């Protein structure tokens, strides 16, 4: 007995995510994708995001005439893939502290879908950057805030809370945890580099 085929209209799902994120989240969760599919999607979305990231850095360097030294696609790929996995784990863990019921696969598939939409947004921002880099920067900020709102809605559906307040609280706690963890990591690397 093989896995049942999944038939999803990605364009409709993307539009639904933007206009009715709670409905879209429920549809995505109803797919019940296996971990083999989820890991494959993670790799695909991370690679596509990395390509657009690298293109945007290259385009910025050409337009501005400034060599940033930030075009490190393999590093970005590893960090993005790792942050998606770690993010889903931490969102699950912190969510459970608030009485949430989301599983790791549920959160992974939702995070991956939002990253796929982020890749599409990056492609559009590349086009806007050709016309107006300043406008592209403003649009990126707006899209980032909208992305947080989408994530809060997705998290709320996955955790079964029916409370965007809890979702935002979990996002804040998770964000603070990431900042603390990264600071600790950087401190350890710095201490190690100094021979302490």
Image (spheres, rainbow, N blue to C red):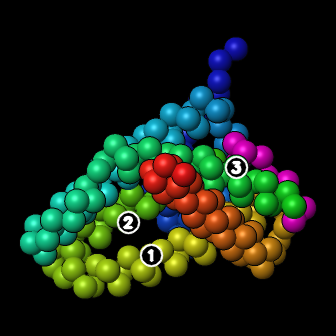
Could you say which disc has been placed on residue 89 in the image? 3
Q: Alpha carbon of mark 1 to alpha carbon of mark 2: how far?
A: 8 Å
Q: Alpha carbon of mark 3 to alpha carbon of mark 2: how far?
A: 25 Å
Residue 183 in the image: above or below residue 51? below
Task: Decide which of tag 3 and tag 1 comes sooner along the chain.
Answer: 3
Q: Alpha carbon of mark 3 to alpha carbon of mark 1: how far?
A: 24 Å
- Judge whether residue 133 is colored magenta: no
Residue, disc 2: 121
Q: What stretch of residues is rendered in magenta?
A: 98-107
List the single residue furthest toward the front.
Answer: 196
Secondary structure under the numbered disc 1 in the rendered image: helix
Q: Is residue 169 visible?
A: yes
Residue depicted at x 72% and y 70%? 173
Residue depicted at x 53% and y 46%? 82
Query: Magenta stretch: dominant SS?
Result: loop
Residue 95 screen position, x and y as percent: 80, 60
- Name the quadrant containing residue 154: bottom right
Q: Marks 1 and 2: CB-CB under 8 Å? A: yes
Residue, disc 1: 143
Secondary structure under the numbered disc 2 in the rendered image: helix
Q: Is residue 6 left or right of residue 119?
A: right
């Amino acid at each position: 007995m093989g896995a049942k085929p999944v038939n999803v209209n990605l364009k409709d799902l993307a539009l639904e995510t933007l206009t009715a994120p709670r409905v879209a989240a429920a549809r995505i969760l109803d797919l019940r994708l296996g971990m083999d599919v989820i890991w494959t999607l993670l790799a695909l979305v991370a690679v596509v995001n990395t390509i657009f990231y690298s293109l945007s850095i290259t385009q910025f360097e050409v337009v501005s005439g400034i060599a940033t030294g930030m075009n490190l696609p393999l590093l970005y790929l590893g960090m993005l893939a790792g942050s998606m996995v770690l993010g889903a784990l931490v969102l699950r863990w912190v969510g459970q502290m608030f009485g949430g019921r989301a599983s790791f696969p549920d959160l992974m598939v939702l995070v991956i879908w939002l990253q796929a939409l982020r890749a599409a947004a990056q492609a559009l921002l590349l086009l806007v950057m050709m016309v107006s880099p300043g406008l592209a920067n403003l649009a990126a900020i707006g899209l980032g805030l909208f992305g947080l709102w989408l994530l809060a809605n997705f998290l709320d559906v996955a955790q079964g809370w029916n409370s965007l307040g809890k979702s935002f609280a979990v996002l804040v706690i998770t964000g603070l945890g990431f900042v603390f963890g990264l600071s600790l990591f950087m401190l350890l690397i710095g201490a190690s580099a100094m021979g302490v």
